Image (cartoon, rainbow, N blue to C red):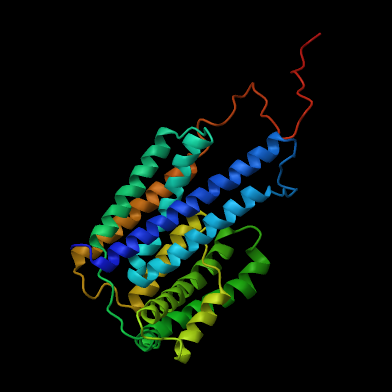
Amino acid sequence: MGISRDNLHGLVLAVSSSVFIGSSFIVKKKGLKKAGDSGTRINLESEITLTYPVSFSLLCTVILGEIANFAAYAFAPAILVTPLGALSIIFSAVLAHFILQEKLHIFGVLGCVLCVVGSTTIVLHAPQERNIESVKEVWHLATQPGFLVYSALVVIAVSVLIFYCVPRYGQTHLIVYVGICSLMGSLTVMSVKAVSIALKLSFSGMNQFVYFETWIFTIALDTFNTAVISPVYYVMFTSFTILASMIMFKDWDSQNASQIATELCGFITILSGTFLLHRTKDMGNTPKPDEEAPVFGDTNNRAPETAA
């Protein structure tokens, strides 16, 4: 299946978003290292105030990344856009290798290759974007029995996690909070897509903000957080988002079993690369056992004690 014009636009925006988000990690770490070199102790118990240029650069890269990601949903299906978020990990790893001199281990390189291969597979076999001429069509899709049932199940599951699991297991099981964010995030992405479609149509001359449905989607968008933070979050968030998109927008209706299986294989390949990158990110950077790890802000520079 060839890449449509809209999918190509969505691809460029999604990749641009990953570049900006990946760069923001480097800007932040560069600022932290610079602060450490200037004598500020960095640890888990204290916070550090970054300099204005670093803070401004960090803010700009994050904002540009989120805007590009938001716009990508207006052109391409969530099945194409959401998995490409893994590319931000690649860009941050590569930039860290050249800018921060953090060695990229051979397994890290393999992880990057897997992410690229998986992303390419998804892009080449992604379904065409549904031709939507009004936000009312999105509202009709959102109120179909299948998506209403999915939304109800998500609300029930999140309620159980919040009121039953969080008090008992929230501090010991990562899956509790990740599950809450991932489940609600899958609904949020549908709101992101609805609002981005409304903006796209409005800019083309068909004002969609006269419809109450657009404002309902906007309120939903303003309520929840859709950031992807960790590999586990990425896996669950992307999986639930693809499921929600499949139910609401019926992205796979125009595809055969072979194309769907190929996309799933590409997604699994990305997951493998993401997992490998995170598991091996510190390989080659760990100090030797007989070496004392430097502490930012330690101006004493004490020499190792020797026997008398």
Q: Is residue 25 left or right of residue 245?
A: right
Name the spot of residue 154 as percent of width and height, x first.
Answer: 49, 77
Locate the N terminus by quadrant. bottom left
Q: On screen, 255 above or below 115?
A: below
Foreground pick, 27 / 162: 27
Q: Residue at x 68, y 47 (%)?
A: 51
Q: Residue at x 41, y 37 (%)?
A: 107
- Say if residue 275 shows up in the picture: no
Residue 178 placement: quadrant? bottom right
Residue 264 placement: quadrant? bottom left
- Say if residue 298 shows up in the picture: yes
Q: Residue at x 38, y 85 (%)?
A: 135
Name the spot of residue 284 as percent of width and height, x first.
Answer: 51, 30
Task: Name the outermost residue toward the top.
Answer: 308
Q: Residue at x 76, y 12 (%)?
A: 306
Name the spot of residue 215 as percent of width and height, x first.
Answer: 50, 85
Q: On screen, 52 above or below 211?
A: above
